[in-house]
Amino acid sequence: MGETEDQKLPEVGEIVIATVNRITDYGAYVSLDEYGGIEGFLHISEVSSSWVRNIKDYVRPREKLVLKVLRVDEARGHIDLSLRRVSGKEKQEKLIWWKREKKAESVFETVGEKLGVEDPKAFAAEMVEKFRERFPSAYAGLEELVEKGEPAVSKLELKSEIVKTLLEVARQKVKIPTVKIKGFFQLRCPGPKGVEAIKDSLVSCKSSKKLKKVKIETYTVGAPRYAVEITAKNWKDAEKALQELVDCVLEKIKSYGGEGDFRRET
């Protein structure tokens, strides 16, 4: 388990992905996938909170595990790990992160192949490191690239050819996660300009600068009923936008002498 001079080691408390290499009566030796395959050790006492008679009942050769780093001996390159101290939430979040990063590697490798680089895998590894320096993760950087276009990666100082090819491939393979909520307005406004007042209430509020983070669609179900659908990257943004839209529309229609209410779709 020796460490090379320039090999990076994980930090104590870090959650890591590891592959089981070999199993002994007293524990398992694993390679850390995110750290170039350096070896770590999972002692049998750190496998489960209950008594473990046979470690092979809990881990198998070549199995992927989510582990927590307990101790790191930098001088000797020894890394002690734990399986039982990883919570269900930590495991789930790490596996999602890992799956997304592997997808990012695949995108970069495809870009390398399209550009005709000599070693697409090495190119992908280099790109992953570049993106992780600028974004929370390589995949998060690709999401921002798809969402905002070439300016999103301007600080990475990549060649124009790489950026254009990367954007092309990312748009095909990276899907921005979204949530959608829907509801219905009941809007009435008396007088000859009532229809225009309702239309202005919906259109002007929909165009508010406060709602730029979300996508809003409104359409008539059958007067006086009007549907609204809000698509956002997460529930928090969607709910906030919906409340701001509802408050705006109801206040606007009231200013025209009309009235209204809103109900969420169940």
Image (cartoon, grey):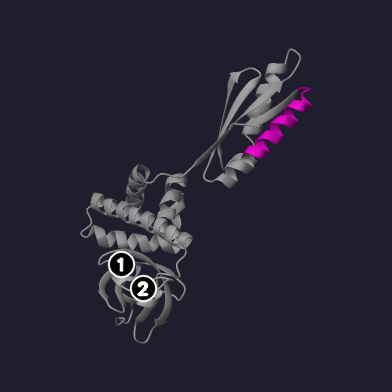
Nearer to us in this view, 44 or 94: 44
Nearer to us in this view, 54 or 140: 54
Contact flag, marks 1 and 2 (Cβ < 8 Å): yes
Q: How many marks?
A: 2
Question: Residue at image x 72%, y 16%?
Answer: 193
Question: Residue at image x 46%, y 51%?
Answer: 152
Residue lying at the far top of the rendered structure: 192
Question: Residue at image x 44%, y 45%?
Answer: 176
| Residue 139, horizontal then vertical, whole percent | 40, 54
| Residue 240, horizontal then vertical, whole percent | 63, 43
Query: Residue 85 sits in which quadrant?
Result: bottom left
Question: Residue at image x 59%, y 45%?
Answer: 237
Q: Secondary structure at mark 2?
A: loop
- Magenta residues span 242-258
Residue designated by label 1: 57
Task: Report the amino acid beneath label 1.
Answer: Asp
Dominant secondary structure (helix, strand or loop) of the stretch shown in magenta? helix
**Is residue 138 in view?**
no
Nearer to us in this view, 227 or 166: 227
Q: Secondary structure at mark 1?
A: helix
11 is within the stretch colored magenta = no
Eyeballing the image, is 228 above or below 211? above
Task: Report the amino acid beneath label 2.
Answer: Val
| Residue 175, horizontal then vertical, whole percent | 40, 44
| Within-10-Å neighbours for mark 1: few <14, some 14–19, many 20+ | few
255 is within the stretch colored magenta = yes
- The quarter of the rendered structure image containing the C terminus is top right
**Is residue 105 in view?**
yes
Q: Earlier in the sequence, mark 1 or mark 2?
A: 2
- The quarter of the rendered structure image containing the N terminus is bottom left
On residue 142, which mark appears?
A: none
Residue designated by label 2: 52
